[in-house]
């Protein structure tokens, strides 16, 4: 029987496994298996040729027991409600694991921005805000960039929301340009948080990161910053890929050459070096290295290829890159697979910092942002390791993902309990 790859069902299965291990109250479990609020909306947009195209948008608030919902907005041609629901669930656990005063949310529009002009994207973005304005706000649901959205889109959205309210509301979303009070450090924060986690995990596993071989799947914002930061700490990135394929060199790759190749040919496979060879995304995942960093899309490591993964440390910088079946296989093989909502939490942590700064009207320099980020993600990593060790002492073997779930779910359940929700 083929493995179920529906992202929302995967998120429910992950919750179910943790709930069983931690003996979660049945009512709390039932509440946490489904989102609290789901909105589907239509967005009519006047295109540049004068025609009107109707787009479908989504916004999901998964759970707000610990604070306002927090989560990005994705623009993708294959966007669907199950993906948005899954991502909103993972945002709930991510915020809880980092001990932020947020719940989880997510949004998206079914569209292909590669086929749209900037003015069409702007009108669609403003239309999305008009359609969800009653559902969002600094105290209710805070938006952020995600796949194929960026700081400029956030600026348009913030401006539209502010116009509708009649006053500036900078805190309605994060990931804004610094000109309209985005936070220093926001744009490399996801990768930076992942690198702090890699440092702690490498230390625990006795991997010397100076000269360590690193593989990165994905050349978007997170993947590109991960390359730069890994290089800065002395690691050697031997392979990287984008949606069209990958490039591999045992001698290591050069970021400037990769960016030039991407700009010129549309893919990192245009990289020019006599020792480099083109490889598929599938093959890239199965190379031998010290660290593998999936930083692309969901469901990249599944039951069909997990047994071919041969790294000691796997860092899930993407959302949901490893399926539950693969999770079990990797655990049995001894691969330390650190889950997405731990590894990529740097983005939402610095989004939290941005929101706090917006509310206060007081802004921090880059060193303060990085210092605070390091402190939070480092604590989260050690919390996960401690929980895994405590369960092992009781004769219960749990994966790092299950340990992270147990911490995150217990915090949300406790908040629901004291609020009288069950």
Image (cartoon, rainbow, N blue to C red):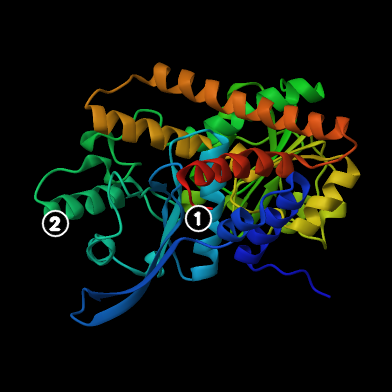
Determine whether 252 is above or below 366 in the image: below
Q: In the structure shown, which secondary structural element does the residue marked by tag 2 occupy?
A: helix
Which disc, if any, is residue 218?
none
Q: In the structure shown, which secondary structural element does the residue marked by tag 1 occupy?
A: helix
Tell me residue 409's x, y (percent).
61, 45
Whether residue 334 sits left or right of residue 23 in the image: it is: right
**Which one is earlier in the sequence, the residue at label 2 or at label 1?**
1
Determine whether 55 is above or below 161 in the image: below
Tell me residue 137's x, y (percent).
27, 49
Residue at 54% over, 35% down: 191
Of 288 and 378, which appears nearest the observer?
378
Whether residue 310 sits left or right of residue 93 in the image: it is: right
Of 292 and 157, which appears nearest the observer?
157
Residue at 31% over, 45% down: 173
State whether residue 313 appears in this view: yes
State whether residue 297 appears in this view: no
Which disc, if any, is residue 88?
1
Whether residue 38 sits left or right of residue 190 in the image: it is: left
> Which residue, given by chain and number where applicable, does mark 2 sit on?
164
Furthest-bottom residue in this view: 51
Of 309 and 400, which appears nearest the observer?
400
Characterize the local packing of mark 2: few (<14), some (14-19) or many (20 or more) Cα atoms within 10 angstroms: few
Residue 375: image quadrant is top right
Of 13 and 374, which appears nearest the observer?
13
């Amino acid at each position: 029987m083929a493995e179920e790859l529906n992202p929302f069902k995967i998120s429910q299965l992950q919750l179910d496994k943790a709930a069983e291990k931690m003996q979660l109250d049945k009512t709390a479990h039932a509440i946490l298996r489904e989102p609290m609020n789901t909105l589907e909306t239509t967005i009519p947009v006047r295109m540049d040729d004068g025609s009107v195209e109707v787009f479908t948008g989504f916004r999901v608030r998964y759970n707000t027991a610990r604070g306002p919902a927090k989560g990005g907005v994705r623009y993708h041609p294959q966007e669907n409600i199950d993906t948005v629901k899954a991502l909103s669930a993972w945002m709930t656990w991510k915020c809880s694991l980092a001990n932020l005063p947020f719940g989880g949310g997510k949004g998206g529009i079914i569209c292909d921005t590669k086929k749209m002009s900037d003015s069409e994207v702007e009108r669609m973005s403003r239309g999305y805000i008009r359609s969800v304005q009653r559902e969002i706000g600094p105290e209710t649901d805070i938006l952020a960039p995600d796949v194929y959205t960026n700081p400029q889109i956030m600026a348009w959205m913030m401006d539209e929301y502010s116009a509708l309210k009649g006053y500036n509301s900078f805190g309605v979303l994060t990931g804004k340009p610094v000109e309209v009070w985005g936070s220093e450090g926001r744009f490399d924060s996801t990768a930076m948080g992942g690198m702090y986690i890699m440092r702690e995990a490498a230390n625990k596993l006795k991997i010397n990161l100076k000269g360590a071989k690193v593989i990165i799947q994905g050349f978007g914002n997170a993947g590109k910053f991960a390359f730069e930061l890994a290089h800065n700490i002395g690691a050697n990135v031997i392979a990287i890929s984008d949606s069209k394929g990958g490039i591999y060199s045992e001698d290591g790759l050069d970021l400037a050459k990769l960016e030039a190749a991407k700009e010129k040919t549309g893919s990192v496979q245009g990289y020019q070096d006599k020792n480099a060879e083109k490889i598929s995304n599938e093959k890239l995942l199965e190379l031998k290295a010290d660290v593998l960093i999936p930083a692309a899309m969901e469901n990249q490591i599944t039951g069909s290829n997990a047994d071919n993964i041969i790294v000691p440390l796997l860092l899930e910088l993407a959302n949901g890159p490893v399926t539950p079946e693969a999770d079990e296989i990797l655990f049995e093989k001894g691969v330390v697979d650190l889950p997405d909502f731990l590894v990529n939490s740097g983005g939402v942590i610095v989004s939290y910092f941005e929101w706090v700064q917006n509310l206060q009207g007081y802004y921090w320099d880059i060193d303060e942002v990085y210092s605070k980020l390091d402190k939070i993600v480092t604590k989260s990593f050690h919390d996960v390791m401690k929980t895994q060790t405590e369960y092992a002492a009781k004769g219960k073997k749990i994966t790092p993902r299950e340990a992270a779930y147990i911490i995150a779910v217990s915090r949300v359940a406790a908040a629901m309990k004291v609020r009288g929700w069950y």
